[in-house]
């Protein structure tokens, strides 16, 4: 789906900035989602220029559909926009309200396909044309399952882009088939403590946050549903266009740090994050992982602790989230272990950070 984001420097465990990634490793996007967010800001009368400046973008860059934006900038823009609009569910809001045709060729190659299964296979193959960080999957087993993962961007730093993609995907499935499809399950990897009743009503089933994966599953027979705008001639033409566009995208050049972070994300709440498991997940031995990280001036413990620190600050900003829950989400055995670690990271107790309103 459409998406966008910023090239913020990575922070080391001592809080200092690490060097920016090489330009060739920065996933880029066409900027459609960024433009949707800006339209929402402008319609609400919120000054856009200061927000763009804070995330390293300009109005000229975002307004030009021929220019591509870094996915990290888009993620940062969505975070800023959500705060300015006081809409903590901005990704969902945009997915519910936007015109899917704004997605451009990706939407049309899906809409002109013969069946929903064909459309979802097009999504899985060509989403990279729109956003190099998004990896959609479509698999058939006991159900038709649509998955979403990230390449080259730390998954734990994003909420709104993921939510846009997930809710927009189910919306498009419904619009293309003319049926209100209800998933067997609908799961999102990051945690939410607020009221998600509107999301649940929209999906038609429970929306599980804090899950192991970003995915939803439909009845297996859904893949054979015919599409209301199927057009074989148009689809053949668009497939050629999309294949040419896909050939122009870059191969996955994810930095090792990002790959490690994304492998860690789903394991944190379970308290079972060990280097050996992460190494196996990445297809290498623990010794090889350690050597490769060392070659980049990193180590596994540093990455894990920085992730925990970043997420702790984010979670503490959510006043509905009890400190004991935050400790569990970060994989600590108890609150005291979390408190001790947080003091080591920031010099303050979690309660002090919350009281100061810094988090």
Image: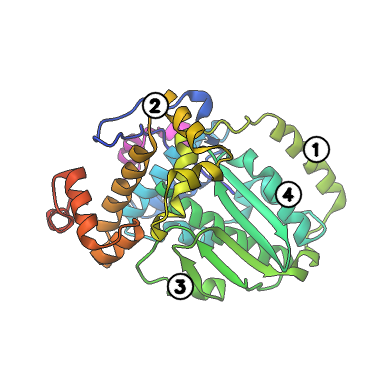
The percent coordinates of residue 268 (x first, y second) are 40, 54
The residue that mark 4 highlights is 122
The residues tagged by marks 3 and 1 sit, at their Cα atoms, a distance apart of 39 Å
Q: Which residue is mark 1?
A: 240
CA distance for labels 4 and 2: 33 Å
Displayed quadrant of residue 180: bottom right
**Mark 3 neighbour class, 10 Å CA radius: few under 14, some 14 to 19, many 20 or more:** few
Answer whether labels 2 and 1 touch (C-beta < 8 Å).
no
Q: Earlier in the sequence, mark 3 or mark 1?
A: 3
Q: Quadrant of residue 90?
A: bottom left
Q: Are marks 3 and 4 in contact (CB under 8 Å)?
A: no
193 w.r.t. 147: above or below: below
Q: Earlier in the sequence, mark 3 or mark 4?
A: 4
* Of the image marks 4 and 2, the number of the one nearer the N terminus: 2
Mark 2 crowd level (few <14, some 14–19, many ≥20, 10 Å Cα): few
Q: Residues within 10 Å of mark 1 (few under 14, many from 20)?
A: few
Q: To which residue does mark 2 refer?
A: 20
- Estimate the spatial distance between the alpha carbons at disc 3 and disc 4, rounded to whole Å: 29 Å
Q: Residue at x 33, y 62 (%)?
A: 328
Give x and y (percent) for residue 5. Answer: 45, 40
Circle 4: is it few (<14), some (14-19), or many (20+) Cα within 10 Å? many
Q: Is 56 within the magenta? A: yes
Q: Which residue is mark 3?
A: 198
Q: Which residues are magenta?
A: 47-62
Viewer-nearest of discs 3 and 4: 4
């Amino acid at each position: 789906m459409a998406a966008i984001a910023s090239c913020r420097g990575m922070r080391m465990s001592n809080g200092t900035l690490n060097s920016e990634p090489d330009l060739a490793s920065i996933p880029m996007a066409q900027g459609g989602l960024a433009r949707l967010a800006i339209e929402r800001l402008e319609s609400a009368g919120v000054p856009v220029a200061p927000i763009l400046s804070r995330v390293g973008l300009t109005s000229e860059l975002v307004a030009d559909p021929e220019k591509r934006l870094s996915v990290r900038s888009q993620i940062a823009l969505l975070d800023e926009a959500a705060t300015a609009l006081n809409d903590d569910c901005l990704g969902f809001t945009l997915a519910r309200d936007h015109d899917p045709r704004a997605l451009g060729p990706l939407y049309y190659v899906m809409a002109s396909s013969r069946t929903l299964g064909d459309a979802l296979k097009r999504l899985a193959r060509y989403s990279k044309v729109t956003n190099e960080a998004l990896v959609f999957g479509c698999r058939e087993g006991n159900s038709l399952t649509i998955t979403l993962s990230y390449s080259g961007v730390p998954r734990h730093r994003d909420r709104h882009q993921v939510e846009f993609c997930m809710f927009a995907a189910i919306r498009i499935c419904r619009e293309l088939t003319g049926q209100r499809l209800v998933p067997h399950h609908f799961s999102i990897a990051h945690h939410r403590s607020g009221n998600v009743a509107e999301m649940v009503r929209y999906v038609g089933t429970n929306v599980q946050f804090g899950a192991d994966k970003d995915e939803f599953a439909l009845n297996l027979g859904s893949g054979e549903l015919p599409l209301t705008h199927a057009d074989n001639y148009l689809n053949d033409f668009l497939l050629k266009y999309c294949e040419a566009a896909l050939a122009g995208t870059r191969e996955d050049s994810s930095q090792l740090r990002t790959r490690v972070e994304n492998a860690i994300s789903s394991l944190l709440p379970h308290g079972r994050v060990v280097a050996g498991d992460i190494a196996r997940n990445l297809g290498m031995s623990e010794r090889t992982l350690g050597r490769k990280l060392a070659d980049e001036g990193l180590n596994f413990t540093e990455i894990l602790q920085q992730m925990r620190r970043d997420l702790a600050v984010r979670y503490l900003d959510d006043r509905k989230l009890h400190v004991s829950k935050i400790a569990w989400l970060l994989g600590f055995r108890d609150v005291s272990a979390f408190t001790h670690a947080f003091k080591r990271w920031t010099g303050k107790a979690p309660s002090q950070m919350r009281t100061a309103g810094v988090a």
